[in-house]
Image: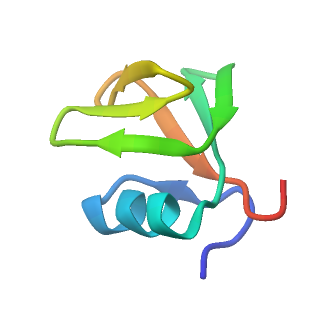
Amino acid sequence: MYMNGQMIYDDRHFLDHMSSEVPVQIYCGRRHSDIGFIEYYGKEFVQVNNIFYNRKQFTFVSRPGY
């Protein structure tokens, strides 16, 4: 499983979090942008809370137990 604060970036990471319903925290640089469950992921975007985040622009961090 993933540790709290671990960065996720691979398709497998996103699939694991989506299927296991593990929340992710999203950052733009060092600024917190959002936290929630992955609803969809694709090659370029991840959808959380009905918002599409560009995988190249944002950083995704695992937050199990949040």
Name the residue at 40% across, 64% down: 13
Name the residue at 49% across, 44% down: 38
* Viewer-nearest residue: 49 or 54: 49
Q: Quadrant of residue 35?
A: top right
Whether residue 15 is situated above or below residue 40 in the rendered picture: below
Q: Residue 58's x, y, as percent?
A: 44, 27
Coloration mode: rainbow
Name the residue at 28% across, 29% down: 56
Q: Is residue 35 left or right of residue 49?
A: right
Whether residue 62 is situated above or below residue 29 in the rendered picture: below
Q: Quadrant of residue 3?
A: bottom right
Q: Residue 17's x, y, as percent?
A: 51, 62
Q: Residue 46's x, y, as percent?
A: 36, 35
* Viewer-nearest residue: 51 or 31: 51
Q: Is residue 4 left or right of residue 42?
A: right
Name the residue at 60% across, 82% down: 1
Q: Quadrant of residue 31?
A: top right
